[in-house]
Amino acid sequence: MSAPGDNAAPVIIKRKKVTGGDGHHGGAWKVAYADFVTAMMAFFLLMWLLNATTEKQRKGIADYFSPTIPINRISGGGDGSFGGESVFSEEVLPQNGTGATNRRPTESRQARGEMGVAAQGAEQSDAVMESAAERALKDVEDLLSGTSGESNVSRKMGRHILTRLTDEGLLIEVFDLPGAQLFRTGTAEPTDLLYQIAGILSEAGALVQNGIAVEGHIQAAPVVLAHNPVWDLSAERANAMRQLLQDRGLDAERMQRVTGHADREPVVRNPMAMRNNRVEVIFLRSDSG
């Protein structure tokens, strides 16, 4: 009770006990668990990546994350414009024949005389000549395929002719079709169709002076024969084609080889298909024989 005459209200102090929440109500452990799960996911992704990629792919990935960037394949250690090399070094572009610093220079990279450009000029001339020869073969191909608009090949004969440029030269493939054969069945006697095609090939061949190779191919026999004539017949047909080309104006000196391949190189999956009966005339590149 308050003392008599004291009008002040009594002060009541209430103390409330505050306690922290249970352990599962905190958030610190969740951060740690998330970091652990992320690390485990990264680990398993790494294991999967190592198992699912090849050595070459792994090297590419490692190079992608590599902090180093190669600037010079070979460096002399200097910090100048040429990375420690001089303008007379054969590892750089400018050459005047006085360097030859490479210990093992190649034929195309060694020093040559005072100016060092004679061989380079010869190489450029060879490249120009090769380019001209390539264009000439392409012109022959365009003439036979009709892409130039000046082809003498009729649609009927064009169905038997296929051309393509290969490493060996311009290959002209002349082949049988059902009801239209190049040779009498089982012989090397040309049909009228082949006579006409040979005339067209001779006209096209007059546009270039490349050497010529003729190859004969035969379809496989449906049964095993005691005496299989495919070798002799393919060679005879190739030789007959050579003779037809020469009779129509192609110089015999341009003939480099005449070969028979029997049934060893079919162009379709079925070795007995008529499509494998063909003669290939190749206008050889200058470096082919």
Image (cartoon, grey):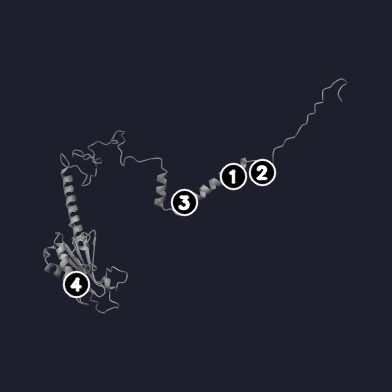
Cα separation between marks 1 and 3? 24 Å
Looking at marks 1 and 3 on the same chain, the residue that comes earlier in the sequence is marked by 1
Q: Which residue was labeled with disc 3?
A: 49
How packed mark 4 is, by other alpha carbons closer than 10 Å (few <14, some 14-19, many 20 or more), is some
| Kind of residue at disc 4 | Leu
Marks 2 and 1 close (CB-CB < 8 Å): no
Cα separation between marks 3 and 4? 62 Å
Looking at marks 2 and 3 on the same chain, the residue that comes earlier in the sequence is marked by 2
Rendered location of residue 255, percent (x, y): 14, 64
Give the quarter of the figure containing the C terminus. Answer: bottom left
* Mark 3: secondary structure: helix
Quarter of the view holding residue 288: bottom left
Which one is in front, 144 or 284? 144
* Mark 1: secondary structure: helix
| Kind of residue at disc 1 | Tyr
Cα separation between marks 2 and 1? 13 Å
How packed mark 1 is, by other alpha carbons closer than 10 Å (few <14, some 14-19, many 20 or more), is few
Q: Which residue was labeled with disc 1?
A: 33
| Kind of residue at disc 3 | Leu
Looking at marks 4 and 2 on the same chain, the residue that comes earlier in the sequence is marked by 2
Looking at marks 3 and 4 on the same chain, the residue that comes earlier in the sequence is marked by 3
Q: Nearer the viewer, mark 1 or mark 4?
A: 4
Marks 1 and 4 close (CB-CB < 8 Å): no
| Kind of residue at disc 2 | His
